[in-house]
Image (cartoon, rainbow, N blue to C red):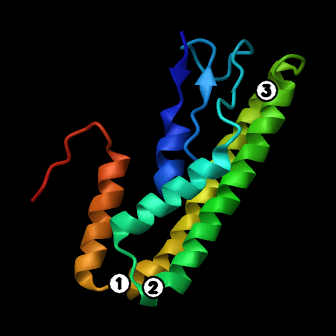
C-alpha cells in the first residue's frame, strides 16, 4: 500500500509552487525507512505546473495591470518545481543502492528545497498581494486558506 506524502506537495502545489506530482512511499511507515523510495509518477510535470499556474491565475482574478508581478510569481513556481524535481531525482538515484544515511540526507534535501520554495514564493507573491485591492486580497486569502485545508472544513467568522 502506498501512502501519499501530502506535507511536501499540498503546500508546494499551492504555496510552494511546485507541480502536481505526488510522492509515494512503498509502505505507510516512516519516510526514513530504507525500504521507501520516492517515485515520480508523471514525467510531464511541466504540463502540470503550467496547468496549476493557469488555474491559480484564474482563481486570483489577476488583472492586466498585475501581469508583470504575476509573471514573477509564475516563474518562481516553475523554478521551484525544477529544484524540487532535481532533489527528488537525486533521492530516486539512491533508492536502490544508497545507505540509510544517504537516504535520510537526500530526504532532508527534499524537505529543505520545499521549505526554501515556500519562502521564495512567499516573497514573490508578497509584492503582487500588496498591490491588490482589498477585495482581491480577501479572495487570495480564501483561495490559499481553502487549498491549505483541503478536505477540512474551514471555520468562518
Of the two numbered discs 1 and 2 on the same chain, state the one appearing first in sequence. 2
Measuring from the top left, give residue 80's x and y in whole percent.
66, 57
Of the two numbered discs 1 and 3 on the same chain, state the one appearing first in sequence. 3
Name which residue lies at 20% across and 47% down. 154
Name which residue lies at 65% across and 34% down. 42
Q: CA distance from mark 1 to mark 3?
A: 43 Å
The residue that disc 1 covers is 132
Element at label 1: loop
Element at label 3: helix
Find out whether the residues at labels 1 and 2 contact each other: C-beta distance under 8 Å: yes
The residue that disc 3 covers is 103
Total numbered circles: 3
Give 111 or 57, whichever is nearer the viewer: 57
Name which residue lies at 79% across and 32% down. 91
Q: Quadrant of the C terminus?
A: bottom left
Q: Is residue 4 above or below residue 45?
A: above
Amino acid at each position: 500500500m502506498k501512502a501519499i506524502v501530502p506535507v511536501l506537495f499540498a503546500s508546494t502545489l499551492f504555496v510552494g509552487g511546485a507541480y502536481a506530482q505526488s510522492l509515494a512511499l512503498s509502505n505507510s511507515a516512516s519516510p526514513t525507512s530504507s525500504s521507501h523510495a520516492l517515485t515520480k509518477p508523471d514525467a510531464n510535470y511541466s504540463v502540470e505546473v503550467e496547468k496549476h499556474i493557469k488555474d491559480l491565475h484564474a482563481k486570483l482574478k489577476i488583472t492586466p495591470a498585475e501581469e508583470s508581478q504575476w509573471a514573477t510569481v509564475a516563474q518562481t513556481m516553475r523554478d521551484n518545481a525544477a529544484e524540487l524535481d532535481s532533489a527528488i531525482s537525486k533521492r530516486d538515484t539512491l533508492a536502490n543502492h544508497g545507505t540509510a544515511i544517504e537516504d535520510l540526507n537526500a530526504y532532508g534535501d527534499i524537505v529543505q528545497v520545499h521549505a526554501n520554495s515556500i519562502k521564495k514564493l512567499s516573497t514573490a507573491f508578497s509584492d503582487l498581494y500588496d498591490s491588490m485591492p482589498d477585495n482581491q486580497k480577501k479572495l487570495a486569502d480564501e483561495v490559499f486558506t481553502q487549498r491549505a485545508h483541503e478536505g477540512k472544513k474551514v471555520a468562518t467568522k
